[in-house]
Amino acid sequence: MFWKKKKNLGKNPFYNQRDYIVIYVQCDNCGEVFRSHIRKSSELFTNFQGKASYILKKELIGSKCQNRINIYAEFTSGFKPLNFEISGGHFITKEKYEEHEQKEEEK
Ligand SMILES: [Zn+2]
């Protein structure tokens, strides 16, 4: 059932939603989860060299610890990721993020 295919985070952890690229990230240090909306029109750097059309540089700092999460990615003009790297944290799926938020509310 292709419509229920699980997202392959190793291949593409980015959720392409209209004007935004949405990322879900978990802190490697404390386990805090983040959801970040990156506005395509203003938060991506336009690139004119090589294959990449857009470059993303994002730093996330949580409220639970001082750890900084840095994300770097290169996209084609169609917002397909060419390559990406993340330090201080790792990408999670939307489902995992929501599951985590649910648990936080129940505490
Ligand atoms: Zn943290």
Image: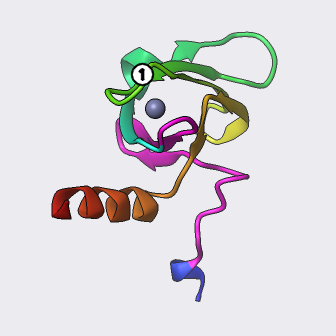
SS label for mark 1: strand
Is 70 situated left or right of 83 in this image?
A: left
Q: Position of residue 38 (x, y in %)?
A: 40, 29
Q: What residue do we see at 49% from left, 42% from top?
A: 25
As displayed, is residue 105 above or below residue 39?
A: below
Quarter placement of the N terminus:
bottom right
Residue 19 lies in the magenta-colored region: yes
Pointer 1 local density, CA inside 10 Å: few below 14, some 14–19, many at least 20? some
Closest to the observer: 9 or 76?
A: 9
Q: How many marks?
A: 1
Q: Given the current orientation, which residue lies at the most extreme bottom position? A: 1
Q: Position of residue 73 (x, y in %)?
A: 65, 28
The residue that mark 1 highlights is 61
Colour scheme in use:
rainbow
Residue 89 lies in the magenta-colored region: no
Q: Given the current orientation, which residue lies at the most extreme right position? A: 50
In which quarter of the view is residue 19 placed? top left
Q: What residue do we see at 67% from left, 39% from top?
A: 81
In which quarter of the view is residue 53 placed? top right
Is 44 situated left or right of 9 in this image?
A: left
Q: Which residues lie in the magenta part?
A: 5-30
Q: What residue do we see at 42% from left, 27% from top?
A: 40
Closest to the observer: 87 or 10?
A: 87
In which quarter of the view is residue 83 placed? top right
Q: Position of residue 93 (x, y in %)?
A: 50, 58
Q: Position of residue 33 (x, y in %)?
A: 41, 44
Q: What residue do we see at 28% from left, 63% from top?
A: 103
Say which amino acid is labelled 1: Ile
Quarter placement of the C terminus:
bottom left
Closest to the observer: 70 or 44?
A: 70
